[in-house]
Image (cartoon, rainbow, N blue to C red):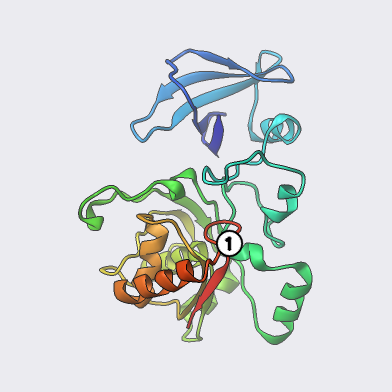
Amino acid sequence: MLLNSPLQNREFSVYIKGRIKINNELFFNNELTAKIISLQKDGTRIVSFYHNNQIIGSEELFNILEIIGHIPLPPYIKRKENKKDETEYQTVFSKKRGAVAAPTASLHFTDEMFQKLQMRYKTHFLTLHIGAGTFKPVEEKFIKNHIMHSEFYEIPMSTCEVISSNKPLLAVGTTVARTVECYAKSGIKIGKSDLFLHPNNKPKRVDHLLTNFHLPKSTLLMLVASFIGIEKTLEIYKIAIEKKYRFFSYGDAMLII
């Protein structure tokens, strides 16, 4: 089971490997169980969790999962997680629970590097809880027909003010780029973003982008193309393959200026 996000009424959105039916129960260690409430068309399942036969909420569940759970490494990492992943697959400035995957461009920063960066440049923060939909490939023949997954975001007022200014912006990662562009288009600082940036829907506010090399047929690769065009994207990826750059979460990064 992959925990996706908490919902209302102590219910949770999850992904479950294997066939299950409504009212089925799943049993875990530490007296934790889950009951299937509904099956969603997007592949998610709605469940309630119980501990010692008592229904529990987010805080109690997270405390148990810290003991019995596993780090949800991306499916293309073909190994089990290890102790090192607890720090390596996490940003140095993460604060709030909610994402099911790391914003990979941020993994390049150490505490020391980030402190040096802050001495030279003004940095601003925002929150976007990356969902499992980020791994879903685009399968439509015409990309504009792709239904984009939605993810919760929250932007502090100080960051909103910078986005609303005319100051140049460097977004660290596609997560930040999408959130900035969502606010620039909607003016909403807390909500859910389903913004799909691609060559026919280009960014309006972000000037520069630091990002990893992304999977083929992914919305993230199309976001890169929205900044520099399809031909330049293919050119850069050809060079990356020839030079044997590392792709995906634990991979190398590029700077689009």
- Residue lying farthest to the front in this orientation: 242
- Residue lying farthest to the left in this orientation: 142
Dividing the picture into quadrants, the one containing residue 186 is bottom left
Residue drawn 52% across the image and 73% down it:
254
Q: Is residue 92 above or below residue 228?
A: above
Q: Is residue 252 above or below residue 257?
A: above
Q: Position of residue 55 (x, y in %)?
A: 63, 20
Q: Is residue 215 above or below residue 159?
A: above
Asked which secondary structure carries label 1, the reply is loop
43 sits left or right of 245 in the view:
left
Dividing the picture into quadrants, the one containing residue 203 is bottom left
Dot 1 alpha-carbon crowd within 10 angstroms: few under 14, some 14 to 19, many 20 or more: some
Q: Quadrant of the N terminus?
A: top right
Q: Depth check: 96 or 110 in front? A: 110
Q: Position of residue 65 (x, y in %)?
A: 69, 32
Q: Position of residue 201 (x, y in %)?
A: 29, 68
Amino acid type indicated by mark 1: Gly
Residue drawn 49% across the image and 27% down it:
16
Q: Can residue 158 be seen in the rendering of this structure? A: yes
Q: Is residue 218 above or below residue 202?
A: above
Q: Depth check: 231 or 99 in front? A: 231
Residue drawn 67% across the image and 59% down it:
91
- State the residue position of label 1: 251
